[in-house]
Image (cartoon, rainbow, N blue to C red):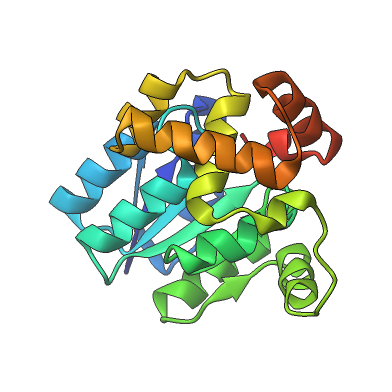
Amino acid sequence: MIHVLVVDDHELVRVGLRRILGECPDIGRINEVASGEAAIEYNREHCPDVILLDMGMPGMTAFETTRRLVRTRRSVKVIILATHAKSPYPTRLLDEGARGYLTRDCDARELVEAVQKVYQDTTYIGAEAAKQLALSILPGTAETPFDDLSTREMEVMLKLTEGDRVPDIASKLCLSPKTIATYKYRIYDKLGTRSEVDLLRMAMRYGLLEAT
């Protein structure tokens, strides 16, 4: 029987996901937490088989959460549940160790199928994410300027658009403020922005803030 952990900061979402998953006879245990930090602790103590992780929670990013979950237990299977599959999110999260990527508009059948597939050690990618991944391997097909950012730069960028200060980002990502400041200005240079306001406007223009 599959043991699933649902990670989302919205109680109504957690209730809905539990209801869907509870109808699957292969799933024997469903638990829930409201943050990435709590998911890491639960993963360490209770060893769930599959973790459904919301992409857009406040606090620790989905990138860092996935990285730590997999580092703690290589056997855990993480499925990202995101608002959309805009590049470069699917690629970056799979690189961090996620075994599945779904958008929130998937139906109940696909959600259950994704859990079953990753439990069987198969990577499961939703249709829209699969399309973005296919495009990403073609030369000259970058969808947004953000494709040029590294995974760590993506994390810092997301936190900057949320209004976090450099010391706060450093604390959340377990890096020094000096390192975060270096990332910040590297991001500005790659994207051609000059300030957090410019960065926010660009992220909004490309729809990336839907996933934060």
User: Could you tell me residue 147's position as x and y percent?
Assistant: 70, 57
Give whichever of 136, 210 is nearer the camera. Answer: 136
Q: Residue at x 80, y 39 (%)?
A: 207
Q: Residue at x 79, y 33 (%)?
A: 202
**37 sits to left or right of 126:** left
Location of residue 194 (image quadrant): top right
The image shows residue 158, relative to residue 201, as above or below, that is below
On the image, which quarter does residue 193 sit in?
top right
Residue at the image position 26 percent from the left and 70 percent from the top: 74
Is there any visible trace of residue 138 in the rendered image? yes
Q: Quadrant of the C terminus?
A: top right
In depth, the one of 133 and 6 nearer the eye is: 133
Asked whether 136 or 66 is in front, the reply is: 136
Q: Quadrant of the N terminus?
A: bottom left
Whole-percent x and y of residue 8? 48, 36
The front one of 208 and 10 is 208
* Left or right: 62 as drawn, with respect to 186: left
Q: Position of residue 196 (x, y in %)?
A: 66, 22
Q: Quick check: 116 above or below 69?
A: below
Query: Left or right: 153 with respect to 85?
Result: left
User: Above or below — where is 5 with respect to 58?
Assistant: below
Using the rendered image of the protein, determine whether residue 33 is visible from the camera's viewpoint. Answer: no
Please give the name of the residue rendered at 47% of the width and 18% of the height, measured from the top-left corner.
165
Image quadrant assignment for residue 198: top right
> Where is residue 120 drawn, in percent x and y?
42, 81
